[in-house]
Amino acid sequence: MKNLNNKKILFIICGGISAYKSLETIRLLKKNGAEIKTILTSSAKEFVTPLSVASLSQGKVYSDLFSLENETEMDHISLSRWADVIVVSPTTANTISKLAQGTTDDLASTVILASNKQIYLTPAMNVRMWEHKSTKINLKKLKDFGYKLIGPETGDMACGEYGEGKMSEPLKIADKLNQFFLNQSQNKKFKALVTAGPTNEYIDPVRFITNKSSGKQGYVFYD
């Protein structure tokens, strides 16, 4: 995963039982040289602690939309500009709904709306929530907006049920990001020469002239 080296990844953790997988994903990304900044939603703190996330990311954990510690800059702008890519993991049904509607009621959703970078979502929810019509409609909107999905997978869930909606494994998420940066580097190698077609000399078929010897004037037509 050499393409992750020195890349800036903004990692947003939302409130779901799959949040524990985010710790392993962050560890993998750091191991391969990525620079990580993290945002925890208020619900995410119920599943993972800021201390554990900070220990693995080796950086500050952000969570508040308005912070007295950074009163000279707006985090939702600075973080969105800093990142090369944004990953939302896990992406809950609630987060999918908020993003589809353009709701910005916390730091995570505000950063995403303020960003012009590629955003990856890793859905994780109960199979019934994943199959609900409202979720499908919201996902279609997000795909139209340019968001990319990683997963979900089909398998056993923490709730005891089985089906689609299980969050992708950390290795698959890291692989997808590695491929994203690989494609970026390859696209930069291509150069394009744009031409508007051949250059032809234009000859006016009709010209007004004066005969120097006789002084007579008139139009001359060229074939």
Image (cartoon, rainbow, N blue to C red):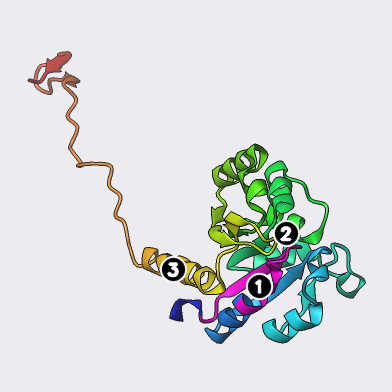
Amino acid type of the residue tagged 3 in the rendering: Gln
Q: Earlier in the sequence, mark 1 or mark 2?
A: 1
The dot on residue 179 is 3
Nearest the viewer among 102 and 48 is: 48
Query: Where's residue 222, x and y in %?
Result: 10, 20
Query: Where's residue 21, x and y in %?
Result: 64, 73
Amino acid type of the residue tagged 1 in the rendering: Ser
- Rendered image quadrant of residue 221: top left
Asked if residue 10 is among those painted magenta in the image, a careful observer would answer: yes
Dot 1: what SS? helix
The dot on residue 111 is 2
Question: Residue placed at 19% from the left, 32% from the top?
Answer: 202
Query: Where's residue 90, x and y in %?
Result: 66, 63
Amino acid type of the residue tagged 2 in the rendering: Val
Q: Earlier in the sequence, mark 2 or mark 3?
A: 2
**Residue where numbered disc 1 is placed:** 22
Nearest the viewer among 149 and 146 is: 149
In the image, farthest residue toward the right: 68
Label 1: few (<14), some (14–19) or many (≥20) C-alpha neighbours in 10 Å: many
Rounded to the nearest angstrom, the CA distance separating label 1 from label 2 is 19 Å
In the image, farthest residue toward the front: 160
Residues rendered magenta in the picture: 5-24
Rounded to the nearest angstrom, the CA distance separating label 1 from label 3 is 19 Å
Res. 138 visible in picture: yes
Question: Residue placed at 58% from the left, 65% from the top?
Answer: 85
